Amino acid sequence: MARIVQKFGGTSVADIPRIENVVAKVKREIDAGNQVAVVVSAMAGVTNHLVDLTRQIDKLHDAREYDVVVATGEQVTSGLLALALQKQGIKARSWQGWQIPIRTDGVHGKARIEAIEIAEFSRRMDTGEVAVVSGFQGLGPDQRVTTLGRGGSDTSAVALAAALQADRCDIYTDVDGVYTTDPRIVAKARKLDKISYEEMLEMASVGAKVLQIRSVELAMKLGVRLRVLSSFSEDPGTLVVGEEEIVEKELVSGIAYSRDEAKITLTLVADRPGVAAAIFGPLADAAINVDMIVQNASGQGRTDLTFTVIKSDLERAVQVLTQKKPELGFDDLLFDPNVAKVSVIGVGMRSHSGVALGMFRALADKGINIQVISTSEIKISVLIAEEYAELAVHALHAAYGLDAD
Amino acid sequence: MARIVQKFGGTSVADIPRIENVVAKVKREIDAGNQVAVVVSAMAGVTNHLVDLTRQIDKLHDAREYDVVVATGEQVTSGLLALALQKQGIKARSWQGWQIPIRTDGVHGKARIEAIEIAEFSRRMDTGEVAVVSGFQGLGPDQRVTTLGRGGSDTSAVALAAALQADRCDIYTDVDGVYTTDPRIVAKARKLDKISYEEMLEMASVGAKVLQIRSVELAMKLGVRLRVLSSFSEDPGTLVVGEEEIVEKELVSGIAYSRDEAKITLTLVADRPGVAAAIFGPLADAAINVDMIVQNASGQGRTDLTFTVIKSDLERAVQVLTQKKPELGFDDLLFDPNVAKVSVIGVGMRSHSGVALGMFRALADKGINIQVISTSEIKISVLIAEEYAELAVHALHAAYGLDAD
């Protein structure tokens, strides 16, 4: 007997027939002799409707009351799923965040889970009762309802799985799992059976949006084995686990890309201590996130500094830097929104050299110019002209042997 | 400074502009220096939608999960109203049933309030904060969400007013108050400034549906002064209070009517002890409520027995009695769904004779035949042919001097 946490997102519980489809997924685990806790989101569209109601009143709302309103979406789903399970003869009851309780800090609207008091909840699961839990919700220090922010139900599921010492946390969504790259671009993309937390984080943050980054980070920290799979197919999905569980490490697991970034270059920046801080300080103050940073000092007292920001922040970033030009003392500010970031990801590259070289060659063969290079232990990213993005992804996917047969 | 409980029903909070209209009603009490607790229902239509979702799954639902789903309607309104109050600079916070808590028994779907733990709630009101309370909700003995049944928000408001020792409980609805009779029938119907609990109960139970009967009973029992008034006008409405508060008692306060009843007559029933029990026992077992009962024993061993049931129960009642005919030993069973009950109501009639006579004369003047008469301390009801109902109400309204000038 194992303990399994299953999480179903909004599209998986969008109407009563889909909720009944969820019952079938739960029943399969029960029939396999497992104890099951199910974490649910609000029915698709409901949270947006509730948020819209609060915005009709006031955009600068009291986050405590905002939480009271939006938390009801999950509450409805939890009651409905409990009823649907009971109809199939499965013992079940709903749990709201305040009933377990899932204790959070007091940051309403984006609270963080601090503790889950699991004793009574766990005892009830031991009686064979399926626990249906409203995701996204918690109980703040002042005994008021909190919510975890968008996508918080994934976080609820992971935290609950850790508290229950569950064998697995299955995140049901509308895709079959994690692919070697975006299947909409590369028809030969393959679904991965396993991927490490670290790879998943890199994949997620560069565009392959399957799981909330925050929930993957939490799963890695708490050692929760995740599975990503579809509510609408029988595919076993992708396991997201620690690197040690992956015996046959692929050199490269996937190719990710992002069209969301823009490039800024400051020319002839002074090559002396404190310059980088002087440049990036004002950007941080303006809440502008900087991603890739490349500085290539020539040793002649002046250097070019290139970095990327989210496209929608570009105009503001240029404004901030232009204002600071007298202090920063650069010669020119160049920028280009028409760039794409393409990344090769794999834990295997830790122990293999030559991966980067393979990437550069594959791109060169297609005549694609590399503007910026940035590397980490398990990822190599390059910035290229946006028009080459799809060609680059195709070429790299084939070059690393990821194409399906 | 007084403490006021205000209760707003579904049509009063049906959309954001109406919720903002509620803010104006609250603000007026605040500006008058009062402490205010506001009890809200779900936005119009929301509860029906939620009930419908549960029914799509299963009609024989687990009432605990039904409560989890339907209680969310009030939660949404409470958060939205708190936000709308804050927007106008009024300190406010929402309270769910489990947060106060409003403790109930465990009869989910139609729970009864057992206790309200008011200390912290009351302390917060003393700071000048408006308490916005989700009506209809409670916390059961097993720490699960209960609901009080349809119209339960009126009951929530009255119980809260009693616990707070409030000076008044204002029930906002979509009518101006309690009228001497149905203004849709009698254009000259007058709004009453005051009415006693007892009269209100008789008015409500015979068709003038303004307040939930249960909440009036509770207000009478707990000594809560009620006021019925409209969300959509400036009219001060009708006070519902103890008889002792009404100095100038009217002989007759109102004329009520009901077309909901049907008449059944059993002829030549044995005139001996136990016969009534033998007849009404099987009806009670079939959950059929009997209203007016008239037996007129002639002293010759046999009597006719006439009574009324709700029209929709008529067919079942006839079936039950026909099956029992051999035991009951009546001669014939006659029934008539085309009847109306018309009632004259007034606490003044306690100390005046001649009220009944006036009624009979007024009806006789119009050639209306009285089929059944039934009286209580403050009410005289007659059963007449349904086609005369409006004529009778008009005649009686005029005869007792209730017509507006």
Image (cartoon, coloured by chain):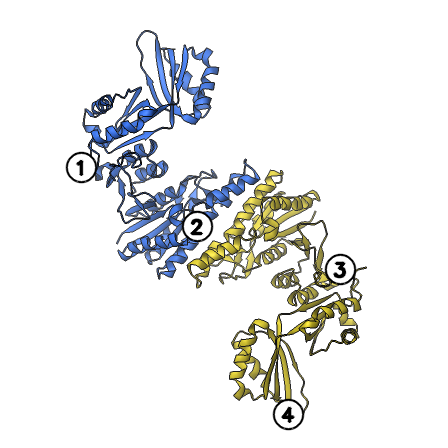
Chain colours: A yellow, B blue
Question: How far apart are the alpha carbons under marks 4 and 3?
Answer: 49 Å
- Give the amino acid type for the residue marked by disc 1 in the picture: Glu
The residue identified by callout 4 is A301
Residue at mark 2: chain:
B
| The label number, if any, that marks residue A277 in the structure image | none
The outermost residue toward the bottom is: A300
Is circle 4 on the same chain as circle 3? yes
The label nearer to you, 4 versus 3, is 3
> Which sits in the foreground, A232 or B126?
A232
Asked whether residue B110 is in view, the answer is yes
Which residue appears at 46% of the width and 15% of the height?
A: B322
What amino acid is at disc 4? Gly
- Nearest to N terminus: mark 2 or mark 1: 2
Classify mark 2: helix, strand or loop.
loop
Q: Are marks 2 and 1 in contact (CB under 8 Å)?
A: no
Q: Secondary structure at mark 1?
A: loop
Q: Which element type, helix, strand or loop, lies under badge 3?
A: loop
Please tell me whether residue A92 is drawn above or below residue B325 in the rendered image: below
Separation of residues labelled 2 and 3 (CA atoms): 49 Å
3D distance between C-alphas at marks 2 and 1: 41 Å
Q: How many residues crowd around disc 4 within 10 Å: few (fewer than 14), some, or many (20 or more)?
A: few
Report in which chain the residue with disc 4 lies. Answer: A
- CA–CA distance in space, label 1 to label 3: 87 Å
Point out the image quarter for the C terminus of chain B. top left
The answer as to whether the residues below labels 4 and 2 share one chain is no
Kind of residue at badge 3: Arg
Choose top left, top right, bottom left or bottom right for residue B273.
top left
* Residue for badge 2: B96
List x then y, in percent, for residue B238: 27, 42
Crowd band around label 2 with a 10 angstrom C-alpha radius: few (<14), some (14–19), many (20+): many
